Image (cartoon, helix red, strand yellow):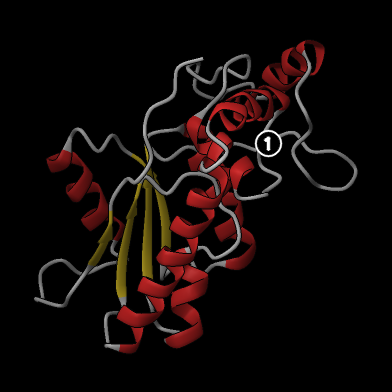
Amino acid sequence: MLVRLRLPTTERGTVPSSTSQQSQQSRREFTGGPPEIDLDRPNIARVYDFYLGGSTNYAIDREFGERVLSDFPVVRPIARANRLFLCRVVRHLSALGVSQFVDIGCGMPTTGNVHQVADEVNDASRVVYVDHDPIAVAHTQILLEQHGDSWRHAALQVDLREPDELWKRVADTGVVDLEKGRPVADRGVARAATRA
């Protein structure tokens, strides 16, 4: 299901920090959105965004992230190294002629998104973002509406544990061509599940 949500923003255009009251208000502003959105629990995509220094996270995510960092301070540099590695791989593959990318487990958009990095090398590159989290997909769709090309970029909410459905939905976008034997770079999930 393609989820189109408008996230609550502050005057500066960023997603607000979450307090209990703000969280309740945020949920009210998500009317019509999927019922599984829970802004009272940390979310791995938003926590990862926090580790990267992004602004697409809530207080609950930052508090959880800080608790993890207090025990495992190496997590933040690992997350940043992972993102830098992603950017290097996308640039390298683009330079080799790969122009189709599927980012499975894309998480929240942050600096160095696959379509932006690929476009630096080949402005005809094509990218489909896939995530199970409706908020991550909604943020990605907003990013693509503002800085993407609907013919070359798409975002889908699909569970990677259903690979047949995932690849069918990717193919149905028409963004990447899985039939012509053209290479497709698949960036799989590199993050673990989180429990609060």
Residue 115 or residue 145, whichever sits in front: 115
Q: Quadrant of residue 181?
A: bottom left
Q: Amino acid at mark 1?
A: Leu
From what the image shows, is residue 110 above or below residue 7? below
Tell me the residue that label 1 is attached to.
7
Toward the viewer: 18 or 24? Answer: 18
Number of marks drawn: 1
165 with respect to 170 (left or right):
left
Residue at 66% in and 36% down = 57
Q: Quadrant of the N terminus?
A: top left
Above or below 95: residue 27? above
Circle 1: element type: loop
Q: Position of residue 118 (x, y in %)?
A: 43, 76
Whole-percent x, y for residue 125 in the image: 38, 78
User: Which is nearer the eye, 166 or 192?
Assistant: 192
- The quadrant holding residue 93 is bottom left
Of all residues, the one furthest to the right in this rendering is 11
Camera-nearest residue between 65 and 112: 65
> Residue sitting at 56 percent across and 27 percent down?
71
Left or right of 138 on screen, residue 153: left
- In the image, residue 160 lies at what x, y percent? 25, 38
93 lies above or below 17: below
The local crowd at label 1, few if under 14, some if 14 to 19, many if 20 or more residues have their Cα within 10 Å, is some
- The residue depicted at 51 percent of the width and 14 percent of the height is 196
Q: Is residue 88 above or below residue 58?
A: below
Q: Position of residue 54 (x, y in %)?
A: 67, 49
